[in-house]
Amino acid sequence: MTRPFALELAPFKFLINTSSSHLYHQLSDLYPSEILIAEELNSIYDFKVSYKSRFWQPGGSMAFQLGHQHFRYADPSQAVPMFEWGLNWCVATYQSRFLCIHAAVLEKNGVAVILPAPPGSGKSTLCAMMMLQGWRLLSDEHCMVDPVSGNIVPCVRPLSLKNNSLAVISRLFPDVKLFQKTEKTHKGTMAYLQPTATSWQKREVTARPRLVIFPKFNAAAQDLSGYALTQSQLFMQLAVNSFNYSVMGQTGFDALCRLSSSVEGYCFEYNDGQLAINEIEALLNEE
């Protein structure tokens, strides 16, 4: 049986048709009721996705599809992480309103810090630590730059953590609850951290970018080391980490030029996330 429900995620709306009898209730651990809507609304949706099992698929595995485009199959026990990855795929692949960079974004005192980094760099752990210390989460996955204003447009979603990050956050913040822990995914063990109340409440409030930090955790590092990037280096690094820079053509080029010329860029290597956070705050406080 197909059960439709909606996700009212600023700036995108998703309509989900699914044969799972559990997915909506699982997602209610991650999203507040004003965002996760139990029925189809009389609305225009940015994405209409199907997340269903097919009779010819072995073991009742779920297929995430957008129109005729298929993302991936998932064992029913991994429905939540596959669904969340599917939403990431939709935004990264098909939206073209905003320049989209693979990065976390957090805001404090009205200005944003962008954290682009490849998998395994410790980005999500650092992002979670910053959020739990009072920063507002705009996104853990998609830095979306408005090509008109140059501001960062939030796309607030649950923050995904995996493997060692789960132990680190549980040790540093023992009162914080992690949800929908799933083992044996292709990325290992996954769980989700809810955005803070402020992050949800201000999910439509843009922020002015101020810093771009390329973080890399290295347990063998001596304290914290880093260096500043030139404007041209920063432009190239951001272009490499962008999902749709080339697709947007001149608009993407202009937006990336504007971003790289209006912020300071740094590469950090550190052995303690708190050291990185302290350095980021020091840079923000500089005149």
Image (tube, rainbow, N blue to C red):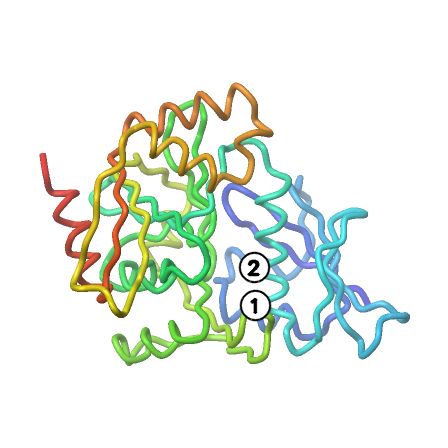
Locate residue 4: give its quadrant: bottom right
Q: CA distance from mark 2 to mark 1?
A: 8 Å
Q: Outermost residue toward the right? A: 56
Q: Given the image, on which type of amino acid does mark 1 rest?
A: Leu
Q: Position of residue 223 (x, y in %)?
A: 16, 63
User: Residue at the location (32% across, 57% down)?
Assistant: 216
Q: Is residue 156 left or right of residue 58?
A: left
Q: Which mark is residue 242?
A: none
Q: Given the image, on which type of amino acid does mark 2 rest?
A: Leu
Q: Outermost residue toward the left? A: 287
Please report contact status of discs 2 and 1: CB closer than 8 Å, yes or no. Answer: yes
User: Residue at the location (77% across, 65% down)?
Assistant: 52
**The residue tagged with tag 2: helix, strand or loop?**
strand
Q: Position of residue 140 (x, y in %)?
A: 42, 54
Image quarter where the N terminus lies is bottom right
For disc 2, the marked residue is 36
Q: Is residue 277 left or right of residue 245?
A: left
Q: Position of residue 165 (x, y in %)?
A: 38, 72
